[in-house]
Amino acid sequence: MDEKRRAGGAPEVPEGAREEAPEARPKGTRRRGAALIRAIHAAAFEETAERGLEGATMEGIARRAGTAKTSLYRRWNSPEDIVLEALHAAYPMEEPAPAADDLRGDLVRALQLMRDSFGSRPKYAQALMAVLAASWARPDLHERLYREVFDPRGERFTKNALLHYADKGVLDRERVTDVVADIGEAMVFKYMLDAMELPDDAYLAEIVDQAILPAVGIDPRTLP
Amino acid sequence: MDEKRRAGGAPEVPEGAREEAPEARPKGTRRRGAALIRAIHAAAFEETAERGLEGATMEGIARRAGTAKTSLYRRWNSPEDIVLEALHAAYPMEEPAPAADDLRGDLVRALQLMRDSFGSRPKYAQALMAVLAASWARPDLHERLYREVFDPRGERFTKNALLHYADKGVLDRERVTDVVADIGEAMVFKYMLDAMELPDDAYLAEIVDQAILPAVGIDPRTLP
DNA sequence: GGTTTTAGCTACGGAACCGTATCCAACAGC
DNA sequence: GCTGTTGGATACGGTTCCGTAGCTAAAACC
């Protein structure tokens, strides 16, 4: 067993949990509207990433955003509300299937889009992970997450590409099942969990060549 | 309050995160040793599942286990310590590759083993999910999780089966890459996240037929 | 039986959050 | 410049959790 984390009642800051310095800005000035909200969203990501969805507090978010608790309660009722709104605002735009005649390239690009969306904003991926985990034990939250965040944007990064080329006759439409359409996302996700970092382009290409293309009946070695 | 519209027999928990009733037992009696520890582990799963790793508290675990906070501090220093120990104790035993001459069946069984391990103990999957999510933002915890929980048991449910049949010449050894060895676990995991439930046997079979077998160059329709 | 461990109970001061109220000041629009 | 709006600061009582202490009593040992 480990040593005691602290001795006595010392208010010492536990290692690793230190908060970022509040958004510094010239004293006697104020943000409002969109600029303020952006700062609060970023703070909500930080707070959720470091303390989990259930550990996040209004006071913590306010501190990180360099604003007052009262300013948060003016708009939201809970950390959860803020985080979900922040996730929604940050969720990547859907890029309509690039019509190039390059199945393999389009699949890789679809996975790149997914990966880059995780890296687009600091702490975005960690915050999303925290919410996903929490939602697994909370049907209400799960429903909200998929309705307010995922659904409105379309989802399915690789599925569009696969269907596009199925329509063109490049591959068999019957093979684009739900299972197959999920392979790419599932693999990227698992990689992130194991490695604690975003996959590089080479790894994405491996996913496409070794998992997705074989699943739709195409040997990548026969491709141009 | 809502009407009671209880159809089935499941002891449905009304939303609101009510805690389970403390382990009832005859008054004036005490558990000790292993029996007590088992109850505390179960309580730690509940607490972590419902409130997240960062939201779990010693008081909450003590309440659920029907024991005293002081009894927890006697052995552990934090909820995290308890949960990690509980996960370690509950992690499924590795089943050596069943030597039957049935690749497809062995793969399905490997995934069943993985799935059943998640359902083996109440709240086990949710607790593990919570810890995984938290660990993604905390290198120390990630290291601990993999060292104290995953590594000691071996991991890789499908990889063993694939390697076994590669050695027998049933499939090409070159195709059993890290990516391919991860497909099964990744797909089960993604399914759980999306559906909030464990996959049934039919879905596991789909994963094997539509994703894993094609990836190792085998058309399931050609199998016995 | 008597003795040693180990659980359970109560209580404590300190800390962090909660959600709200109050008041003042910076901002935007005119 | 004047004015209504929106942020920021402070304070509050109430709750939960922290980690420790002191004590009693059940369980296990011999």
Image (cartoon, coloured by chain):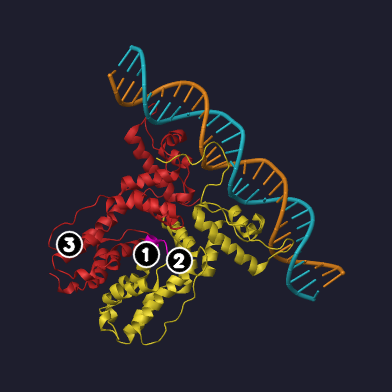
Chain colours: A yellow, B red, C cyan, D orange
Q: Which residue is mark 2?
A: A146
Residue located beneath label 1 in the image? A191
What segment carries the magenta color?
A: A189-197
Q: Are marks 3 and 1 in contact (CB under 8 Å)?
A: no
Badge 3: few (under 14), some or many (20 or more) residues near its Cα, within 10 Å? some
Question: How would you rate the neighbour count of disc 1 (Cα within 10 Å): few for under 14, some for 14-19, many for 20 or more?
Answer: some
Place of residue A65 in the rendered image (x, y in percent of width and height, measured from the top left)? 62, 60
Q: Residue at x 21, y 62 (%)?
A: B107
**Quadrant of residue B170 within the rendered picture:** bottom left
B140 vs A21, left or right, is left
User: Percent from the top left, x then y, of residue A87?
Assistant: 51, 66
Q: Please say whether residue B7 is visible from this viewpoint.
A: no
Quadrant in which the C terminus of chain A is drawn: bottom left
Check disc 1 and give the amino acid type.
Tyr
Q: Is residue A192 magenta?
A: yes
Chain of the residue on which disc 3 is drawn:
B
Q: Secondary structure at mark 3?
A: helix
Give whichever of discs 2 and 1 has the lower sequence position: 2
Q: In the displayed structure, does residue A120 sit left or right of residue B178? A: right
The reply, left or right, for residue B67 in relation to residue B99 is: right
**Label 3, on which residue?**
B164
| Position in image of residue B26 (x %, y %) | 37, 30
Q: Is residue A167 left or right of residue A7?
A: left
Give the Cα distance between marks 2 and 1. Answer: 22 Å
- Could you tell me the amino acid type at mark 2? Tyr
Q: Secondary structure at mark 2?
A: helix
Spatial CA span between label 3 and label 2: 40 Å
Q: Nearer the viewer, residue B46 or B17?
A: B46
Q: Secondary structure at mark 1?
A: helix
Confirm whether circles 3 and 2 share one chain: no
Q: Amino acid at mark 3?
A: His
Which residue is located at x 41 percent, y 57 percent? Answer: A136
